[in-house]
Amino acid sequence: MSHPTTTLGQDTTPDQGIALDARGIRFEGGPRLVLCASLFYFRLPREQWRARLAQVRASGYTCVDVYLPWNFHETAPGRWSFEGRRDVAAFLDLAQEEGLYVIARPGPYICSEWDGGALPAWLGLDPQLRVRQHEPRFLDRVTAWFDQALPLLAERQYPANGPVIMVQLENELDFFDCEDRTGYLTALRDQAVRHGITVPLIACSGQGDLEGATGDVPGVVPACNFYPDDDSPHIEPEVRRYAELLAERDLPLLITETNRRHRTLRRLLASGASLIAPYLQSSGWNFGYTPSAGNWGRPGNLMSHGYDFGGYVSSTGTERPEYAEAQILARVIDTLGPRLALSVPTVPHTPVTTDFPTSSSPSALRLDGGGLLLAVPHLGTGTGTAVVNGVPVAVGPDSCPLMLVDVPLGPWGHEGTLTLASADLVAAGEGVLVFSSEVPVTVVVGDTGVEIPAPEAGTPQRATAAGLTLVALAPADAVRLRSTDRDGSVRLHEPSPARQASAPVAVRRARRRADTAPERAAGRHELPPTLESLGVYRGRGTYRATADLTGVDELLLVGASDIVDLTIADQARPTIAGFGATRRIDVREATGPVDVEAVVEIWGHANFDDARLPALRLGALRGLGTLWKVRETADVSALWEVHGHWAGRPAPLRELGGWSSTRVGLPVTYTREIRTSTAAALHLKGVVEPMRVSVGGGGPHSADTVHEPHTVDTVHAEDPWVPLPAGTHRISVTLPHHPSGGGLRAELLALDPVTDWTCSAQDDDLLTGFATEAAPGQEEVLLPLALAPGEEAWLDVDLAPSHDGLLLRPDGTQIRVTGWAGGECVGRVWAGDRPDFSGGDANVLWVPPGWSGLTLLVRGAAGPEVPQLRVLRLESSD
C-alpha cells in the first residue's frame, strides 16, 4: 500500500495540513521531526491540565498524544459525560493555547492499563457481541461512541481550528485475534471520514505486524510501537528495517510508543524515526475504580493507583533527570532543523570503533544538504573512547552523543565544513557553535582540530578553529541557554527554585462513622449472577446463600472474579484473587446447613487478552462464579487410549502421559470415555505446558450418551480444569511428549451447585455518594485500629491544606483502603498479603491540591496476620 501526501482523498499540502511521505512529516510550511509525550487528561485533576501541558512544552517536546477512554465518557449504557475532568474538548483547547500539537487516540480499544482497555464492561453481557471484531453488534456500539468523540476531534483539527495533527484508530490490533482486520479497520476508517476527520489516520502495531495492525486498509497509516531493552545492542537494525519497509510505501516511520529513556530515543532518531512518542513521559493517576487487571500476561497482576513507569515527570509533577535530557535532545533537533527532519537513515560509512559496549550496527542519518548525524551509544558505566574516522573522541558513560560528520556550515553563515563534532550541537549562529557535554569535546573544522576541556556547571569552555568560536557547556547550563554572542559569551535563564518537601506526618486520629454504606437489593437468583448483570460496572456486590454441607468435605469455586472475600459458617477465608481460576475450598469443619457470604470487588477488567485465566480475557465479566459441593472424587488417570507417533491399532492403553517415545516434543493424544451422572469437573494435575483438550459425545453403544457439541479448549497450568455436564463424554488430551516432565494425573469431581442466592450491589456512584455526604454520629478513634476479617470501618480524616497535594500512605496489615476526596474516589491501596501490582507506588493514595475532605473505607481481609490499620502517613507530593 502506498500513501501519497494526501489524507483520505483530500489534497493535503504543507500549507494546508499534514503531509506524510518517506522523507518525513510536513506541516506549518516545512518538514518537522516531532517529539511527543503521552499526557492523559483522565489521569489528572482538571486544575492541573494547563500546568502539565506547559511543562511538556518547556521540555522541548512539541506534541502530546492522548487517549480518549470510551468507558470514561459513557459511564452507563447511553449515559454520556463530557464535563469536569471528562471535558476532553477543553483539554485539547488548552493544548493549543500552550503551543502543543495533539495525536488523538479514541480507540475504541486503548489498552493503557485502563479498566477493560476502555471497552465498557456491559458489552460482555451480550454473548453474541464480539469486541474488536468486524461484527454488527460491536460496531453499532462503536458508532455510538464515535458519534460522541469524533466530532470533538474534527472541530479541533490542524490547521483550521485546533491542534489535532493525527487520529489513531484502535490500538495494537496485531496483539489480538481479530478475524477480519481489513473489514474492521475499514469500518473504523469510514466512520472517521464520515465525521470529517481529514488529518492522517494511523494505526499502531504493538509487535511489528504492520498488516495485523492496519489490515492494509488504504488511508490508514501504519505506525510502530517499540519497547526494547534499553541496553540491547540490537535496537538500530530492528528499527531501520521498519523505516525501510515504510519507505517502500512512501511513508515515514512513526513511533507512537516506546521507552522513555533519551539514550534510547536518540538511537531511534538516528535509525530514521520522524515521530518519537515515548509512552508516559508525563505520569498521572488511576483515580477511583479505573485501573485494569492482568497486565502484560502476568495473571492476576493489578495496576496501582499511581500510573508511573519512570517518565520524565512523576505522577505528582516532579521533573526527573530525564526532563533535562529531553530539553537537550530538543535543542539538537531545533538547531539542525529541516536538515534533520528531511534526513534518511543509513548504516554509517564512517569507520567507528569503541572501547566500550555499543550498538551491534550503529545508525546514522544522511542530513539534507550533506553530512551525517552519527549516534554512538555508550552502553557501559565508565568514560570511554570512540575512534571516528581515525579521530579518538571521549564518550561519557550511559550516553548517546549525536555526532556530526562532514556537515556544511553554510546555513550558519560560515564557509567550510564541520568535519567532526563529538558532542551534541545545541545552538549555532554566525561564527559560533555551542555543544553540550560532560566529557571533553573534539571538534574538527576542515582540517583543523581542537579538543575543548570537559565543562563544569557554571564554567563554559571555549576554543577557536578556522575562524569559528566553539563553546562547550555542561548539560545543566545547556538546558538554560538563552543566547550566545559571536565571542562565545553565553547568557542563561535563571534556574527554577528548588522545592522543599515537608517532613512526613503520622496521622493517628480519625472519626469513625456509625453507619455503613447502603446496599441496593439485587434480587434472588438460582445461581450467582455477574456483577455487570446487576448494573455494577465498577464497584462491588455481596452474594448470600445457605448450603447444606452434610457429608461434604470440600467446595469448588469456579469462575470467581476478581477480588473475593468468602465467609463460610462465619469463618472468613483468605481473599481470593484468582481471576476465574478454579479453587478448592476445605469445609470439613462445617456440617449441616451453613451460611455462605461472598463480597466481590471489581479491581479492574482485563485490558489485555490473556487466555490463561477466564476473567483475564478481554470483555470478561466479574462476579462470584459458581460454587459447587464436591460429592465424590475419582482418579481417572488410567485406561487412556494412545494416538500418535507409532501407536497402532488397536490403540494401546496407557496412563495419561505415559506413552514412551523418542520423538520428544511431538504431540501425543490420549483419549478415554468418562461417564458422570451429575455435573463434574475434570482436574488435570501436573500440567506444565499448555495442552489441548477436546470433549465430545460418548460412543454409539452408550445408551445414555449425550450427543453434545464437540468442544476444544486449551488447558494451562494456571487453571487446569475442564467442566463437564452430566452425561457420557469422550475426552481427548493432546500434549507434547515430554519424558522429563512431571507426572500427569487426572481426577474427576462430581458436583452439585449451591443455589438460591440473594444479591445486593454497591456501584461506585453509590459508594461515592455515601463517602462524600455529611456523616452524623461519628466517634473519634485513635489508631491503630484492629478489624476482624470482613469487618469495615468508614473513617473521616482531617487534612491540612497542601499547595501540591498530599500522598497518603496507609500503614497496616491485611487491610484494603479506598479513599475519597473532593467528591471523587481517588483510589485504593492494599496493605499486607496481596497480589502483584504494576505501575507506580502501589502503597500510596494521592489527594490532589484543592480536593477537600478525606474519607476512607478500611476493610479487613483474612490472611496470615490480623487486619490492622496502624497509622496514616502523610507526605508532601513535592
Image (tube, rainbow, N blue to C red):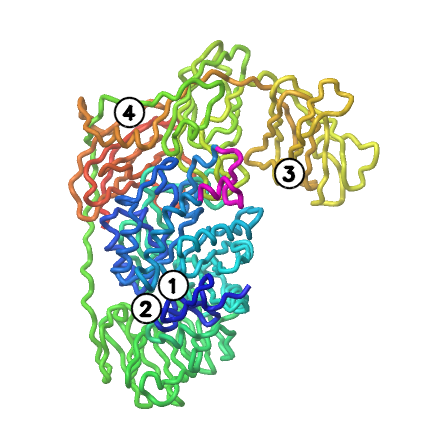
Secondary element at image label 4 = loop
Which sits earlier in the primary sequence, circle 1 or circle 2?
1
Give me the disc on residue 417. Answer: none
- Asked if labels 3 and 1 touch by Cβ distance under 8 angstroms, the answer is no
Is residue 433 toward the left or the right of residue 534 in the image?
A: left
Which sits earlier in the primary sequence, circle 1 or circle 4?
1
Mark 3–mark 4 distance (CA, rounded to whole Å): 46 Å
Q: Which residues are magenta?
A: 126-142
Which sits earlier in the primary sequence, circle 1 or circle 3?
1
Which sits earlier in the primary sequence, circle 3 or circle 2?
2
Q: Callout 2: few (<14), some (14-19), or many (20+) C-alpha neighbours within 10 Å?
A: many
Task: Please give the count of numbered marks on the rendered protein.
Answer: 4
Mark 3–mark 2 distance (CA, rounded to whole Å): 52 Å
Residue type beneath disc 2: Ile
Image quadrant where one finds the N terminus: bottom right
The verdict on residue 378 being magenta is no
Q: Nearer the viewer, residue 583 or 214?
A: 214
Question: Above or below — where is 592 with respect to 735?
Answer: above
Residue 36 visible in rendering: yes
Give me the disc on residue 328. Answer: 2
Residue 797's quadrant in the figure? top left
Q: Callout 1: few (<14), some (14-19), or many (20+) C-alpha neighbours within 10 Å?
A: many
Is residue 221 toward the left or the right of residue 179 in the image?
A: left
Residue to which mark 3 is pinned: 691
Give me the disc on residue 517. Answer: 4
- Asked if labels 4 and 3 touch by Cβ distance under 8 angstroms, the answer is no
Residue 640's quadrant in the figure? top right
- Asked if labels 2 and 1 touch by Cβ distance under 8 angstroms, the answer is yes
Residue to which mark 1 is pinned: 262
- Asked if labels 4 and 2 touch by Cβ distance under 8 angstroms, the answer is no
Mark 2–mark 4 distance (CA, rounded to whole Å): 53 Å
